Image: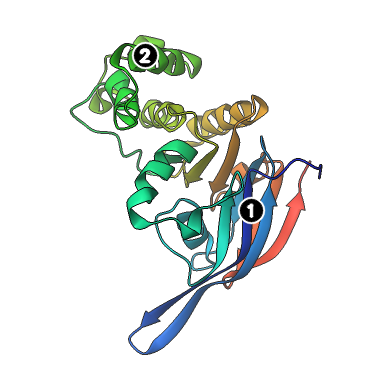
Amino acid sequence: MNDIEPVLQVRNLSKTYMQGKIPVHALNDVSFDVEKGEFMSIIGPSGSGKSTLLSMIGLLDKPTSGSVFIEGVEITKVKESDAPRLRREKIGFVFQHFNLIPTLTALENVDIAMRFARVPKNERKKIALELLTQIGMRDRVNHKPSELSGGEQQRVAIARALANRPVIILADEPTGEVDTKTRDMIVDLLKGLSEEGHTILVVTHDTAISQKTRRIITMRDGGTASDTISH
């Protein structure tokens, strides 16, 4: 570790849900730091807490206790009304089911992420074209999701996640809907993005993905079972 402040700091994060009168501890005192440009995976069995952890980092849910800092800003303390803006500025999301708008083209799906951030129209189109070209989708920019394969849709989703130049990209089972060849292509794409300086956290059940990330956090029973540098 160096003296530069980590991009992401998770401190003593806990989350307890109530099932009727029974408390369920989804996260138990989780802490770790993430440096800029890290490509890391969070693995573990269903119910281990990994998706809960991702939702806390992504400002989709609030912890019972503990803190999350992105670039030194304690995002777990922000007002509810400020959360959408912070998500747009700091975080890019990639989901298992792509979550593209079916009536929009690939270009428009990337463009719309910047529209909410009030990026000027001409600049939006330029950035969207550059991102789609970067991920090998230049000849598919005018195609709608129904005209794209699963892998192509996920590439568009990755371009959309990059559109607002986020500090960190959170990918939740990003290869869960694609074949193994496409999975490998998407993982190589994410790895290449991390080598360009993007910070990427991937939640996955797939060891073929986690083995390609530099760092692996294993979750078990709501806590961190291990945190290893793989290569």
Q: In the rendered view, does 225 fall on the left or right side of 103?
A: right
Residue 181 sits above or below residue 107 on the image: below
Residue 179 sits above or below residue 207 on the image: above
| Res. 51 visible in picture | no
Residue type, numbered disc 2: Glu
Residue drawn at 75 percent across, 53 percent down? 228
Residue drawn at 72 percent across, 57 percent down? 227
Q: Quadrant of the N terminus?
A: top right
Which color scheme does this rendered protein use? rainbow
Q: In the rendered view, does 156 fall on the left or right side of 16?
A: left
| Res. 176 visible in picture | yes
Hey, which quadrant is residue 103 in on the image? Answer: top left
Q: What element carries label 1?
A: strand
In the rendering, which numbered label is found on residue 48? none
In the rendering, which numbered label is found on residue 9? 1
In this view, the residue farthest toward the left is 103
Residue 176 sits above or below residue 167 on the image: below
Hey, which quadrant is residue 167 in on the image? Answer: top right
